[in-house]
Amino acid sequence: MSAPVTRRPSRPSSDDEGFKRELVRLIPHLRAFARTLCGDPTAADDLAQDAMMKAWDARASFQMGTNMKAWTFMILRNQFYSEKRRSWRQTQLDQEAAERTLVAVDDPEAPVALDELRLGLAMLPAEQREALILVGAGGFAYEEAAEICNCAVGTVKSRVSRARRALHAVLEDGSYDRDGASAGDAMRAILADAERLSTVR
Amino acid sequence: MALDEARLRQQAIGVRLRQMFDDVVNEDVPDEFLDILRRADSRTGESG
């Protein structure tokens, strides 16, 4: 047997075991949320790993029975913004990463509309984007999203509704505007699709 | 009616938004994540 001998806790706590099981179950969701914040998949996984470790280290302060998904999302979000503050160049890098991601969809057969959606999301202000993602994709109630974003419930509601309207307008323009810049954006997504299909076989 | 159409479009956006998020949720979790957690776990054992 070549399996390394790992040192085990002398007294594994059943609380720790339960916490860990839940945390493992949440990893895919943390990765997805991180991806929407970072854009770049590698940076997103780094962020998700940091958040996972922060949650593990802070497990004593988690109240069992409360919403652990919301709690870990809050940790991840705080981590993201504190890293951002530390590096003034981050905003620019995020922008570049987001633009790369827009043309680097994993699934070569992904519909163009999904590219347009990514593009539309990238154009939203960060606080609107995260509110819409949490409520519209993450399955959180407005109250939970407010807790995660550390703001009032009414603020989340208005951010989500503004985000929905803006996204709708962007996608609409992309499809119907014949002479504007947004028509060019939609065209860029279509071209990116064609390019991707020609390089993947 | 225009209002109904707007609602339909909003629903379509919602579906795609969830699809985009779920695509990542459904990806295989890289081994790194569990490795890191396992290492943290043994560290806990040393200190406690």
Image (spheres, coloured by chain):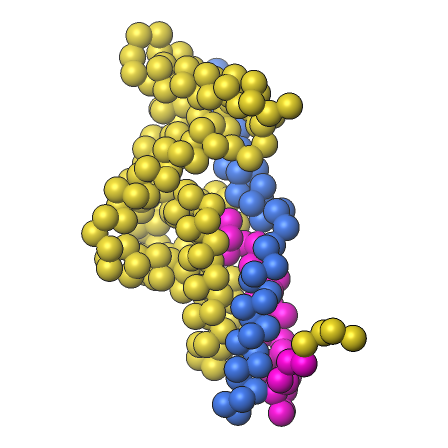
Chain colours: A yellow, B blue
What's the magenta region?
Answer: A5-33
Indicate the quadrant containing the N terminus of chain A: top left, top right, bottom left or bottom right: bottom right
Residue depicted at 53% across the width and 84% down the height: B44
Seen in the picture, residue A17 relative to A25 is either above or below; the reply is below
- x then y, percent, for residue B5: 49, 20
Left or right, A25 with reference to A114 = right
Q: Is residue A17 magenta?
A: yes
Closer to the camera, B3 or A116?
A116
Indicate the quadrant containing the C terminus of chain A: top left, top right, bottom left or bottom right: top right
Residue depicted at 32% across the width and 37% down the height: A96
Closer to the camera, A147 or A51?
A51
Dominant secondary structure of the residues highlighted in magenta in the image: helix
- Find residue A170 and report its image quarter: top left
- x then y, percent, for residue A130: 38, 47
Q: How many marks overall?
A: 0
- x then y, percent, for residue A136: 48, 43
